[in-house]
């Protein structure tokens, strides 16, 4: 009955066709802040790693193509990291010149600043193409290794694991979600399945609910389940490991109604399980937990 009424009278004032409405030349600057605590039990001892990371980047709309997709350039403008583990603390912030990365582990983060990739996405928020990643990696290698060919080879292998097309899609995930094809209103729900490739492959099921709609924005609630792919295998410094993890996440997302841009989101994630590895013929099981909070926001 309600469907017939909508069909006959058009959408009500509270119905929203959620989509991106951007123009060539639009520029949006984001900050993603990641707080993460990882705890592992090894040899009867607990090891904890605390990390705080900040990534700032701009999304420039270079074109709107013939089928309405947005052709953008995403450029890193700031990277900061603070890591504490085993009584040691390392930190770097590209916004502070006196904090140059003395630790080699942070040099890759420093080289990200000023680098760009090209991302094309649909009006409904689906990322359809990522390009320029290899060129970005080569630029980072040249900056870090200079003419040292041996170092270039090592860095290329490491960076290709951290910065491939799928990784880049996920890195900017706080700026995009796949909007539903149907018109939404308060109480509307939809589900999105994601295959996430990090150090280990994850299957993520995101459930969205529309909490509120105003003249300016749409507020969503998201809850998710997270599980590693059965039989997954990862290479950790030459050691083959299998991760068996399960988790949940929940949070809120605010979307600018006129443009479809995500203007802020906060997501809390909790994952637990274990990794199994063959250490010279001896199987090792390492219980672990990962607690994360990710805040993404538009900044000026």
Image (cartoon, helix red, strand yellow):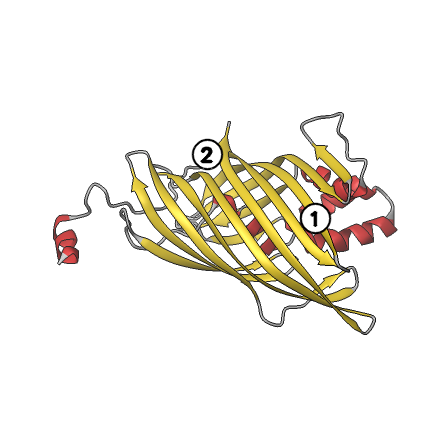
Q: Which of 22 and 29 is in front in this view?
A: 29
Image position of 10 (left or right of 141): left
In primary-sequence order, the first of circles 2 and 1 is 2
Q: Name the residue under label 2.
A: 26
Does residue 222 lie above or below 233 as drawn? above
Q: In this view, does 271 lie to the left or right of 104?
A: left
Which residue is label 1 attached to?
48
Between residue 276 and residue 182, name the one nearer to us.
Answer: 276
Tell me where residue 229 appears, x and y as whole percent.
57, 67
Quick check: marks 2 and 1 in contact, CB under 8 Å? no
Residue 255, picture quadrant: top left
Q: In this view, does 42 lie to the left or right of 186?
A: right
Seen as rendered, the residue at the extreme bottom is 281
Q: Dot 1: what SS?
A: strand
Give the spatial CA distance, label 2 vs label 1.
42 Å
Q: Which mark is residue 237?
A: none
| Rendered residue at 58%/71% (across/down) | 230
């Amino acid at each position: 009955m309600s469907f017939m009424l909508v069909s006959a009278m058009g959408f009500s004032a509270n119905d929203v066709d959620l989509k991106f409405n951007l123009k060539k030349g639009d520029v949006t600057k984001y900050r993603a802040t990641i707080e993460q605590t990882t705890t592992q039990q090894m040899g009867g001892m607990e090891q904890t790693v605390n990390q705080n990371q900040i990534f700032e980047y701009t999304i420039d709309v270079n074109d709107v193509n013939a089928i309405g997709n947005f052709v953008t350039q995403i450029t890193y403008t700031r990277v900061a990291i603070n890591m504490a583990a085993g009584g040691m603390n390392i930190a770097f912030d590209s916004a502070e010149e006196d904090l140059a990365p003395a630790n080699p582990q942070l040099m890759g983060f420093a080289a990200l600043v000023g680098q760009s990739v090209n991302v094309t996405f649909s009006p409904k928020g689906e990322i359809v193409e990522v390009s320029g990643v290899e060129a970005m990696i080569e630029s980072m290698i040249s900056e870090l290794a200079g003419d040292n060919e041996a170092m270039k080879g090592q860095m290329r292998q490491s960076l290709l694991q951290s910065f491939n097309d799928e990784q880049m899609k996920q890195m900017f995930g706080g700026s995009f979600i796949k909007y539903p094809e149907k018109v939404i209103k308060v109480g509307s729900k939809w589900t999105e399945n994601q295959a996430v490739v990090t150090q280990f492959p994850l299957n993520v099921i995101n459930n969205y609910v529309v909490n509120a709609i105003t003249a300016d924005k749409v507020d969503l609630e998201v809850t998710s389940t997270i599980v590693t792919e059965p039989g997954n295998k990862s290479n950790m410094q030459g050691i083959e490991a299998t991760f068996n993890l399960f988790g949940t996440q929940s949070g809120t997302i605010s979307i600018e109604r006129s443009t479809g841009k995500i203007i802020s989101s906060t997501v809390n994630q909790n994952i637990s399980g274990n990794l199994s590895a063959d250490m010279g013929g001896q199987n090792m099981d390492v219980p672990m937990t990962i607690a994360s909070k990710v805040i993404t926001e538009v900044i000026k």
